[in-house]
Amino acid sequence: MNIPFLSFSGMHSLIRQEMLDSFADFYDSNYYILGNKLKAFEKEYAEYSKVSHAVGVSNGLDALIVALRALQVGAGDEVIVPSNTYIATVLAVSHVKATPVLVEPDKATYNISPENIKAAITPKTKAILPVHLYGQACEMEAIMQIASDHKLFVVEDNAQAHGATWNGKITGSWGHINATSFYPGKNLGALGDAGAVTTNDPALCNQAVLMRNYGSEKKYYNEVIGYNMRLDELQAAFLSVKLKFIDRWTAERQAIANIYDQQLKGIGDLVLPFIKAGASHVYHLYVVRTKQRTALQEHLAKDGIGTLIHYPVPPHLQKAYETMGHEPGDFPIAEEIADTCLSLPLWPGMEPAQVEQVCNSIKKFYAGNV
């Protein structure tokens, strides 16, 4: 049987009727923007995230932009970001006219290295933007201590790690103001673009509320130069339904990852996910590394198994950032990850037999290639 990289069927069949009822309620309400469904989801997501405030916005990139703007990060400021993150993290810094400063990750966890953060701080540094990559929490205590020592802000990019924790404290609750995405493929995904900002600071929350809605709190009265970056009522309603199942789906993801761990340990040159002591991993992605990445991916495709590469080109080698003047070799860890990483199929509802099929195909590849 063919195995796609991602399937929504297991999740969506479980909640189909509740989602349809939610749509009907939304449709009949005749209220579609900044209404009670958004308020309800913001309250629910804030409670889930163990923070005082959540502000729904249009997508994850916009959430990052709103968070940085709320902190008044702008021209002349530097923001430290991982060298191996998805491009959106870096784009957000550029969109507020600040300078992204790339920092290499821990090669084992793929998350930004606290020691490398320290080395990158200059008098222009205003914020640190850690990304909980693939679903594993960053070393947030160390990062927050560095920020405190140097009087810097922290903005967590929590797009891939809903429900992950560092030393028991949930991601999205550590930083001064934090951003997340509810893109459909995320662990908590809408049925379209959506995102949110989380914070414990009422003043920053107020800035985010203003920023997402034309800089306006009262209709037609504009306090700051804002954006149209609102999370609409329909996506908020859908997210409220799905939020109730996130812990169940996370447990399924972790169970699937455990099978991969057991079945693929010691196979060929595969490097499996490594979880740092103190971190939990919610497996937005199950990423392996191999120097035979292209051949393995082609082999799996021939066996009807879908895979993806997260991500094939690191930010410093993207054409969009050629003006930064970086060359191949400037960030060797990010480049090595980009050249060797491969994401295996993993989604709630994936059957053990399907996981076994993926593992058997990988074993077959290495039996003929090592």
Image (cartoon, rainbow, N blue to C red):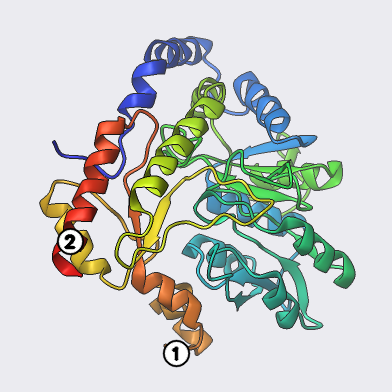
| Residue 190 image point, x, y percent | 46, 33
Q: Amino acid under label 2?
A: Ala
Dot 1: element: loop
Indicate whether 65 appears above or below 229.
below
Task: Give the alpha-carbon distance from disc 2 to disc 1, as whole Å.
Answer: 37 Å
Using residue 168 as the reference point, say whether residue 252 is left or right of it: left
Residue 214 shows in the view: no
The residue drawn where x is 53% and y is 71% is 107
Task: State which quarter of the image contains the N terminus.
Answer: top left
Q: Position of residue 139 (x, y in %)?
A: 70, 59
Task: Using the image as rendered, state which of residue 25 and residue 278 is in the foreground.
Answer: 278
Residue 358 lies, with reference to residue 315, above or below; the image says above
Q: Vertical placement of 4 versus 322: above or below? A: above
Left/right of residue 18 with respect to residue 128 in the rendered view: left
The C terminus appears in which quarter of the rendering?
bottom left
How far from the left and from the top, in percent, is residue 312?
35, 68
The circle drawn on residue 327 is 1
Which residue is at 85% across, 45% downward? 203
Q: Is residue 308 visible?
A: yes
Q: Give the camera-side residue of 81 and 299.
A: 299
- Residue at 77% across, 63% down: 142
Q: Residue at x 71, y 75 (%)?
A: 115
Q: Splitting the image into 4 quarters, where does residue 80 fall?
A: bottom right
**Image position of 190 (left or right of 52):** left
Three-letter code for the amino acid on which mark 1 is drawn:
Glu
User: N-terminal of the two: label 2 or label 1?
Assistant: 1
> Circle 2 sits on which residue?
367
